[in-house]
Amino acid sequence: MNSIYTRIDNLGRENRNTVFRIISRKILEDFSNGVFRSQEDLAYISNCSKATITAFSKAALVSGYRELQIRLKIEYENNFTLNKSNEKLIDNKAKNDFFLNNQYLEKWTVESYEQISNFFLTNLEHKIQVFSGYQTLYSTNFLEDVLQKNNIDVWTLKLDKDIISIKNINYEKVKSIFILSGRDTNSLKGFFEYVYNKNSNIIVIASLNWEKYLQSKKAKAIFFDNEHFNRNYIDRNFQLIYLWKYLDYQMSLIN
């Protein structure tokens, strides 16, 4: 059975340029705003008689305008409640998904921290050299701030500027962290090979597609969580910043 709203809409479409079309348009406009006029008001704004409003109502297959108004209110309330319920469901799902992802993020951070702490919190006199792809430069800047705040000497390699300067570094006093994520990581592979041959004091945070390569090098590695997070700019930086903030917290306890 068609709803009363649909019947009113059909009456307006079937009676073009007639008073029924005008009445239909006025009722539907009011309905969208939650307004339900009296028969007298509707007749006035539609420039017709109350009898015409009654005739319109009967054409909509109800006994009169009072029944039409009651049916409209019921449909409005049902639709309004349904929409509110759907909005609440969507809102609850978003909250649940967000907090669930935070639990996965916490799990990844805690599991990764032991390797990270062994790397950063031993031989504190050594300089930290950071090699990062463009995708994770945002979180790399955050790491740089964390290390400087805790009085650790840090240098972030700029792919387009610092290619020659890495040859002039005394790698006996340097620890290197590589972050391999994004499309430009193949450029970092050459740097990794060079530094790896100079000094094995390296840790890598990488996408899973680097797993076999890093295992062949027996390099210390942490892999991004691809199961619960996307492989895009936002999620990768989100994971790393959370890890660097946890590192900052631990360092503050030591200091």
Image (cartoon, grey):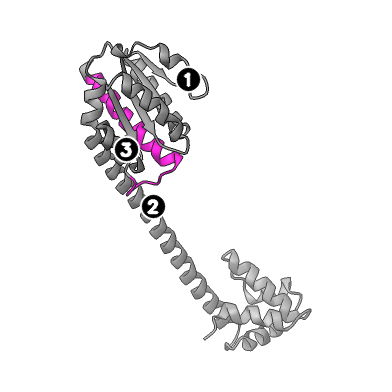
Numbered mark located on residue 163 in the image: 1
Q: Is residue 179 above or below residue 51?
A: above
Q: Secondary structure at mark 2?
A: helix
Numbered mark located on residue 235 in the image: none
Visible residue check, residue 243: yes
As measured in the structure, the alpha-carbon distance from the residue carrying label 2 to the one carrying label 3 is 37 Å
> Which residue position is annotated with label 2?
94
Q: Amino acid at mark 3?
A: Tyr
Q: Dot 2: few (<14), some (14–19), or many (≥20) neighbours within 10 Å?
A: few
Q: Amino acid at mark 2?
A: Ala
Farthest residue, direction right: 17
* Number of the front mark, 2 or 3: 3
Viewer-nearest residue: 65 or 132: 132
82 displayed left or right of 177: right
Viewer-nearest residue: 211 or 81: 211
* Number of the front mark, 1 or 2: 1
- Dominant secondary structure of the residues highlighted in magenta in the image: helix
> To which quarter of the image does residue 207 belong?
top left
Read off the magenta span: 226-253
Q: Position of residue 210 (x, y in %)?
A: 34, 39
